[in-house]
Image (cartoon, rainbow, N blue to C red):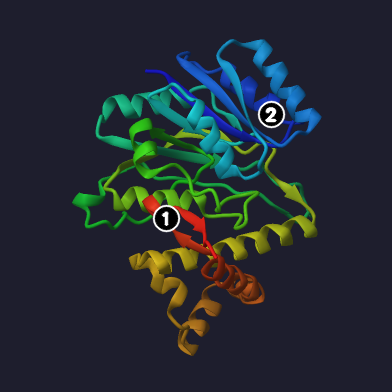
Amino acid sequence: MLISVCVPSIRGHVIRHLVDSIIGQTYTNWELIIGAQGNDPELLGACAAAQSRDARIRVAHIAEFGRSRGMNRAAAEARGEILAFTDDDCEAAPDWLATVAACFEQEPAVGIVGGDVVAPAARPFRISTCPAVHTIERIYRPAESGYTAPPGFYWCGGNLAVRRSVMEALGGFDEYLGAGTEFPVAEDVDFALRAEQAGTVMWTTPRSIIYHTYGRRYGLRSALAHQINYAVGRGAFGAKVYLWGHRLRERWTKPQTLAGRVCRFARNPRRFLVRAALGKYSRQGYTRYLAEYELGPKLLSRRKSH
């Protein structure tokens, strides 16, 4: 089974570490397609160097920026039955692809396999942020579970493998969601909800490990930018869910009662205050999406034609 590793990239200074980790995989039937975005000389040079190291490595150049666009471009060039996605500031555990292949071979009905994303330890006394995900060992069959995932079931786009047939059926990732796009988060959540609606069987396992080695961003400015991006993207995704008519739309549209606010504050005061401070950015994302975007085929976003 050929696995196509699809990696969107904008960071020439770290992509070689990801390449090293793929070349070092215990599973050898793979190809690596780097979705290189923009024309940064350092990135293009790093991609050329990677290609020269191993004939299984190719580069798919895209002039536009956006993680989801880079993933779709790389996937369009892929030849494998399985498409495995991670990021250019990550490193894969040596048995990452072996674990992914074993899951798909063991359960032919499974269409998606997700795993852990492990953040590096933070430096003491430094403000920082780094996305991480810890999965549970579980196979989720939406049609048999009333389209309700078990508690703790979650995966993210930093460690994701998809059957080509599922990718094609869903139309890929929404190119207006995700880092570097108009609404810089939620492309993986959106993909997951569309896959769930289609009845795609999903398997999460903490045995599949990606290390977010170079993903920690330090400093107050980086932390604030991350939170603001999340708020804008979350608001926009709420608007998309509203247009979709998805059952989760009430999370974004239902008015918050005073009692509900008090309970949320009591459970986690810091998170409550951060969310409240960033509320205007969520509203901006929500309003802009409704004003400028609509849902096209396969529930993918598209700009309104005026």
- Identified at 58% across, 32% down, the residue is 7
Q: Secondary structure at mark 1?
A: loop
Front residue of 28 and 49: 49
> How far apart, in angstroms, are the residues tagged by discs 2 and 1?
34 Å
x, y percent for residue 253: 45, 76
* SS for dot 2: helix
Q: Residues within 10 Å of mark 1 (few under 14, many from 20)?
A: few
Above or below, 275 against 17 in this view is: below
Asked where in the image residue 251 lies, by quadrant, the reply is bottom left
| Nearer to us in this view, 106 or 161 | 161
Residue 153 appears in the rendering: no
Residue that appears at 61% across and 64% down:
232
Q: Which mark is residue 148?
A: none
Where residue 226 appears, as percent x and y from the top left, is 68, 57
Say which of 101 and 67 sits in front.
67
Quadrant of the rendered structure where residue 287 is? bottom right
Q: Earlier in the sequence, mark 2 or mark 1?
A: 2
Residue carrying label 2: 15
In this picture, residue 203 sits left or right of residue 73: left
Looking at the rendered structure, the kind of residue marked 2 is Ile
Image quadrant in which you'd find residue 229: bottom right
The picture places residue 236, in percent across and down from the top left corner, at 54, 64
Nearer the viewer's eye, disc 2 or disc 1? 1
Does the residue at mark 2 contact the one at mark 1 (Cβ under 8 Å)?
no
User: Which residue corresponds to mark 1?
Assistant: 296
Q: Could you tell me if residue 201 is visible in this image? A: yes
Residue 103, x across and y down, in percent:
34, 29
Position of the C terminus by quadrant: bottom right
Amino acid, disc 1: Gly
Q: Residue at x 48, y 81 (%)?
A: 263
